[in-house]
Image (cartoon, coloured by chain):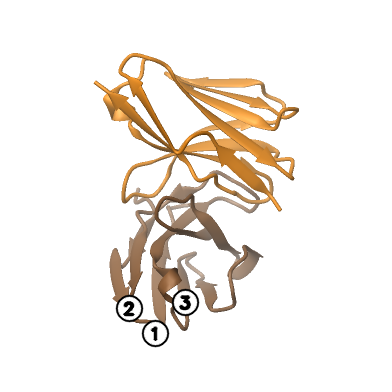
Amino acid sequence: DAGVTQSPTHLIKTRGQQVTLRCSPKSGHDTVSWYQQALGQGPQFIFQYYEEEERQRGNFPDRFSGHQFPNYSSELNVNALLLGDSALYLCASSLGLAGATQYFGPGTRLLVL
Amino acid sequence: SQKIEQNSEALNIQEGKTATLTCNYTNYSPAYLQWYRQDPGRGPVFLLLIRENEKEKRKERLKVTFDTTLKQSLFHITASQPADSATYLCAPTSNNLFFGTGTRLTVIP
């Protein structure tokens, strides 16, 4: 039983570019949440997808958008990258909405130069 | 807005001792509280969940308490081992998870 997988593992972009990160949830899970974790900080909630719709959103600008596919996998898109977007981006899957226990992937380390 | 504070950024203890980590939250009433462990460069891993009507929860060497009056949770690791060295995150939970900044625990052999 595969856990949560994310790709790519590392990514380097320049300011102004766009990036797409991908996530496959744990088998049997239908909800995907995305978090941004800056160095030395706890994960910050970006948004959550369930039934292919964004259900909840944290305090992140519209440059951050996402998508969930029928097979429950998800993408996180960030447009017009800023230096401050450099962080570890974590995907977590769970069963159902609300604050269920999250199973995290290994993350994608994004560096914006 | 919600605020979550975890005691000191770093905690060093001697192997075999009990580590106690504190999580305080303000401005909301979580239905339950979760604790996660995070190793460097990896995603957090779920450890324990305690509900608002539970005072204490145990799992092997781990013990969690939850005081909704004080708005505080304590996380204990007894008989600590160097392998317990990691960052521990608390997440008071209502409709979603909001994480604290974590406490980096180092167990010294």
Q: Which residue is tagged 1?
A: A17
Q: Can you give x and y, in whole percent of width and height, for residue B3 in the image?
A: 65, 47
User: Which quarter of the picture shows residue B13?
Assistant: top left
Chain with colour brown in the figure: A
Q: Which residue is tagged 2?
A: A13
Identify whether B16 is placed above or below B28: above
Q: Can you give x and y, in whole percent of width and height, for residue A93 in the image?
A: 49, 54
Chain with colour orange in the figure: B
Q: Residue at x 52, y 33 (%)?
A: B7
Q: Residue at x 54, y 79 (%)?
A: A63
- Chain letter of disc 1 in the image: A
Q: Which residue is tagged 3?
A: A78
CA distance for labels 3 and 1: 9 Å
Q: Does mark 1 fall on the same chain as mark 2?
A: yes
The answer to whether marks 2 and 3 mark residues whose Cβ atoms lie closer than 8 Å is no
Is residue B26 in sight in this rendering?
yes
Q: Does mark 1 fall on the same chain as mark 3?
A: yes
2 or 3: tag closer to the N-terminus: 2
